Amino acid sequence: MNNWLVIISNKPSKPYFSLTRNWIVIVFLISLTLCLLFPTFAQTKKPSNYDITSQIPFNQPSYYPLQQTINNQLYRPTTTWGGRLILPKPDSPPPSNQQDWVWIEIYNAPETAKNLEGEILPLQWSQQPLTQTFVETVTKDIQFSQAAKNSSNNGNVLPTRLNGLTKVGPLKSLAGARPNDDMIVGLENVKITTNEGGSPILETTLEPMQITGRYYALVDILRTATTNATPENCPGNQPCTSELFQVRHYNPTTKKFDGATEIIRIPQQPLLPNKLFQSTPQGITDSPAGKAGWYIYGAKDREGMFTVQAVKPRSLFQLQPEQTIQGKTAGIKYIDRQNWQNTESRKGTIQSVLVIEEQGSKVDKLSPTHSLLKEGDYALVIHLFGGIGGEKGEPILAGTVTGHFSYGLAQVVRDTFTNELQFDIKYQQVYAQNSNGIISGTHHWENYMGNLEKGWLGTRPVSDVVIKLDALKDYDFGGVILSPFREFMYQLQIMTARYRTGDGTGVARVTPATSCVQDSSQALFIAIKSIENKFYSTPEIQTWLKSHPNDPQTLRFQQLVSLGKKLEKALVPRGVVRPDWQQNAEYLAGINARNGFVNEISIVNSILSWRSMMPRRAHDEVSAIFLESGAELWFLRTNQVGGYDPDIEPVAPTVALGQFPLISKLIERLIFASRLMNGQDWLVVGMTLLVYGAIALPLGFNSGFLQVSSGFSNIKELFQGLVMAFFTPALIEELIFRVFLLPHPTERVSTIMWWLWAGLSLFLFIIYHPINALTFHPQGNPTFMKPIFLTLTGILGLVCTVAYQLTGCLWVVVIIHWAVVVIWQYWLGGKEKLYGSN
């Protein structure tokens, strides 16, 4: 011990320092050499969730034999054309002159092509001009950036097999999105052609849709079948219950679950590094979501047992809402508050709520088995999921649960088992690279939500809003077709393909300026601009509308134009379009092709599109806009549905600081009110000052309270006074009494509620002045006590309140308040009344 004390307390000799320095240099050189020769030594790669789940046999395509013997009375193919994509080797010759092609192992084929099942065929794009434009637009050379390498090392799944390849199109980016060839897809609009040798080639006009399972059935899950097949680990108390379940199939003849019984397997997914299970079958027999049965997706394993890969609750998609909400005010209230109210207590349940703006006969005709929707109808889908709470939940930063946002398309179809009408939902997921291996693109509902390995049905609360509006239907202007749905889905598919490759960098990063919600919103903005461009550049459309002014289609189009303006105002809240959005819109329209796609990550771009920054804000804002435009909204809500995990609970998504409601609301109102002024705002300022002057000047002069005089001795004093008056009282008082106290016009509160808040704000604004004179500003006593001063103050508060309601702009009311104060103080005797003649 004494020796150590000597070393610590005594200054080392120079030779000791020299020796130490030499060793430091040697260690540094060895470390540097190892880092250069073995980069993985410098940064250990974190395993992804996909690395763990994909090693489990039942999550591998090879676990399910190609040849399947299925009872066609109990099971249906998931798609007409379906199979597994296989990325070609870099040196594989293309089957034709197309660069973007992949192999597909055929699982399902139509009756006319059953002989192709089990074959591995080339899949390429149709030669249709729109399809080829899409392919050319998103084809990129892939070279991983440092950000891509960092993302991969942090445990995200990146398209590593594409790194270094040239001319990677949307098919190859989909097939090579994960390290393994396990992308299962369904194909639509397929055409069989042949190459020069006569071998078949599949051609498609649409991007393959990501699906789960080869077959599906409708069953009632009765009970666990045995205690022998139990997983080693599962949520909750041990031991785990069996993975085998006895189910009874739906009987189309009796329309009941009295068909054949069968033993199936619903496997338990492994424990992930975050200590969560992506899904569990534990307790699924008691789930209230299964009251109308479950659709199960999967295939037979090597032993001939049907193994479930995804589940879907039937009752969620039936056109039978549990609740119907009528009227704009009630509908806005549901969107803003009730949709996500008491989310934690809803765990394990589902809700289906229909919201309609109008009241009357159209709504009165609804019954539990009747809907305003008809077979074949299309509807827009807005998707939003929340957070994972509970003992093993995700960390929540600053009271904010961001969630995830996307759009999609729903169609009303007739179910092949029950013959009832249902929603068939396909998402367009603009999705950054992630640990689970969820790939940006088109997803069928059961693949994105119900998939046991990757889906969110069992772990997150979800709100899907199905929006039906006649204005979104196709238009036929004398042979010129305009399709809002097709245009929007087209722009979304461009965006999802860009995300898969990161525009050539290999990674799509999430930032305040680029994210699922920002870029889904960008696709919507570009779609609006594209429709506008087609309208103005196509004389036939304008001619047709002028010659058919009262045609129902013309009225629908006018509704579409109005809707587009409202949506664009929400997407461009400050009246200034983000430069990258504008350039991308011009690039896709063929106006400006100099630089291709632009993806600018900057604070300025975040500010210009802040209303589309938070998923919850975009979900509620867009839903409300469609409701006000006369749309029918179906809210389909799930809250950690399926098996029961006691260690987690659903958490509602929020706006910024949303778990601190008061702070969040004040910050939100401040952001909303801080937009730039436009010409209309300046007009309101001018008109308000004229109205106030017309009232206040006669009252003030007649009472002797106002007197013309100069309240400054030099320009410097005037300038200092003008600057000070802008901040106090104008800015501070308007922030408190208008911005923070009054609901912003975008909040869509009822008229009665707005007047109540306006009355409270005006009352507090008036009494604040005498209180201020008695406390912090004694110079205001006795001026602030006089009835004439309080009268003029009340009138000022009233006109500022009206101006704020008209504009929703902080700077409008600040300028009005500031102008009144400085005119009174420096030209109408205010300074003398406050500070005396000196």
Image: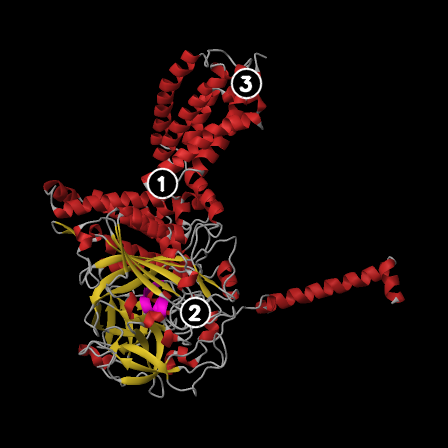
Residue 609 point in image, percent of width and height: 40, 45
According to the image, label 1 marks what residue?
Answer: 753
Q: Nearer the viewer, residue 133 or 563?
A: 563
Q: Which residue is mark 2?
A: 161
Secondary structure under tag 1 reads helix
Q: Residues within 10 Å of mark 3 (few under 14, many from 20)?
A: some
Secondary-structure class at tag 3: helix
Mark 3, residue position: 834
Mark 1 closeness class: few <14, some 14–19, many ≥20 residues within 10 Å:
few
The residues bearing labels 2 and 3 have C-alpha atoms spaced at a distance of 76 Å
Task: Give the answer, above or below, for where 197 lies relative to 425.
Answer: below
- Return the mark for residue 703: none
Residue 443 falls within the magenta-colored stretch: yes
Disc nearer the start of the sequence (2/3):
2
Residue 247 in percent (x, y) is at 31, 81
Which residues lie in the magenta part?
441-450
